[in-house]
Amino acid sequence: MTSTWTDGRRMAVLLLKLAAHISPPTRREWVRAMHNELEHLPRGAAALSWALGCALVSYRERVSVMIGSLNSVARWLLSIEMAVCLVPLTWLFVAVFAMTAHGAMPLEFGILAGSGALLGPIGLLVGLRTIFVARGSLSKTTAIVVALLAAWTVVAYCLQVMRDGASFSDGWRDFALVVVLPAWAVAHLLRINAARRPTAAVI
C-alpha cells in the first residue's frame, strides 16, 4: 500500500510540473497555489486525481491563449498565411476553368473540380477584405457561404478521388493543398470575424 501511495504521489508531482510548464505566465500564482495544495491532500488516488485535473485545466488555459492570439496576428503575416493557404486552390480554379472552356477537360469533371476549387478565389477576396479593411467584418450570410464552400471543397475532392479510383494515402499532398490549408484559412478568418463582429460593420 505504501508503494502505491508513493507512486501516486510521484505521478501527481510530475503532473503538476507538467501543468506548471504549459500554463500561461499569467497563471504563475495559480501554479504555486497548486503545489501548496498538494501538500495537504491525502496520498494516493486523491492526489493523483487532483493533479490530473490541474493539468487538464492548464491545457485548457494554454489552448485558450493560443486561440486568442490568432486574432492579433500582424497583417503582413496574415497575408502570407492566406496566400499560402488559398493561392494554390485559386490557381487550380483558373486552370480548371481555362481547360474546360477550351474543351481540354470533360464538362462534368470541370464542373466538379471547378466548383470544388471556387473557395480559392472567393476565400482570397474575403481574406483580403478581412485583413485590409479596418474593423471589417463579414455578414452572417458571407460567413455561411464561405463555410459551405469549404465543406463542398472536401466533398468534391473526395468524390474526385473515388471517381478516379485513387488512394487517399497516395494523394496526401494534394489533400493538404486542396483541403487542409484552405479549411484552415477559412477557420481562421471566421475566428477573426467572430472577434470583430460585435463592434464592426457588416460587409
Image (tube, rainbow, N blue to C red):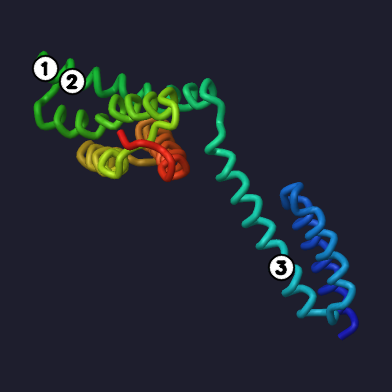
**Residue 172: quadrant of the picture:** top left
What is the number of the mark on residue 97?
Answer: 2
What is the number of the mark on residue 127?
Answer: none
Q: Which is in the foreground here, disc 3 or disc 1?
A: 3
For the residues labelled 2 and 1, say whether their Cβ atoms are less than 8 Å apart. yes
Q: Nearer the viewer, residue 142 or 203?
A: 203
**Mark 3 or mark 1: whose residue is earlier in sequence:** 3
Residue 86 locus on image (x, y percent)? 38, 26
Residue type at mark 2: give it: Phe
Provide the residue designation for mark 1: 101
Mark 1 lies on a secondary structure that is: helix
**Mark 2 or mark 3: whose residue is earlier in sequence:** 3
Residue in the picture at 53% in, 38% down: 71
Mark 2 lies on a secondary structure that is: helix
Residue in the picture at 29% in, 32% down: 119
Above/below status of 55 relative to 63: below
Q: Is residue 172 visible?
A: no
Query: Which quadrant does the N terminus fall into?
Result: bottom right
Query: Which quadrant does the C terminus fall into?
Result: top left
Residue 182 locus on image (x, y percent)? 38, 34
What is the number of the mark on residue 52?
Answer: 3
